[in-house]
Image: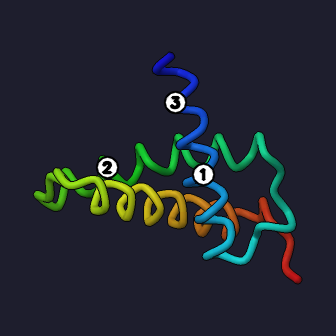
Amino acid sequence: MDWIVSLVIGGIVGWLASIVMKTNAQMGIVANVLIGIFGSSLGYWLAGLLGMAPTGGLLRFAIAIAGASLLIFILGKLGMFRKG
């Protein structure tokens, strides 16, 4: 059951991050889930390096979206997403 919840939340986080980064039209559901899961991990890792430990649900969700947005930005700079 935990895997299903992780996939659903990862999909939502990835979808919201793709809307923020304006890459929504270029990404499908699989990409949204993968970006959401790996981007959330990146966000939590960076927050830990900065000494932040998000405890509230809203702050954890914001860090997950920020991490996923950062991952989309990095992938965009590597040429994974086309402009336009």
- Which residue is found at the position 53% from the left and 41% from the top? 37
What's the amino acid at mark 2? Tyr
Where residue 54 appears, as percent x and y from the top left, is 19, 54
- Which residue is found at the position 59% from the left and 33% from the top? 7
The mark nearer the N terminus, 3 or 1, is 3
Residue occupied by mark 2: 44
Q: Is disc 3 placed on a helix, strand or loop?
A: helix
The relative height of residue 64 versus residue 23 in the rendered view (above or below) is: above
Query: Can you tell which of label 1 and label 2 is closer to the viewer?
Result: 1
Q: Circle 1: is it few (<14), some (14-19), or many (20+) Cα within 10 Å?
A: some
Where residue 73 appears, as percent x and y from the top left, is 60, 69
Residue, far left:
51
What's the amino acid at mark 1? Ile
The relative height of residue 46 versus residue 11 in the rendered view (above or below) is: below
Q: CA distance from mark 3 to mark 1?
A: 11 Å
Q: Do the residues under discs 1 and 2 have CB atoms within 8 angstroms?
A: no
Residue occupied by mark 3: 5
The relative height of residue 19 versus residue 47 in the rendered view (above or below) is: below
Mark sitting on residue 37: none
Residue occupied by mark 1: 12
Where residue 69 appears, as percent x and y from the top left, is 54, 66
Q: Circle 3: is it few (<14), some (14-19), or many (20+) Cα within 10 Å?
A: few
Left or right placement of residue 76 versus residue 4 in this view = right
The mark nearer the N terminus, 2 or 3, is 3
Left or right placement of residue 76 versus residue 58 in this view = right
Q: CA distance from mark 2 to mark 3?
A: 18 Å
The C terminus: image quadrant: bottom right
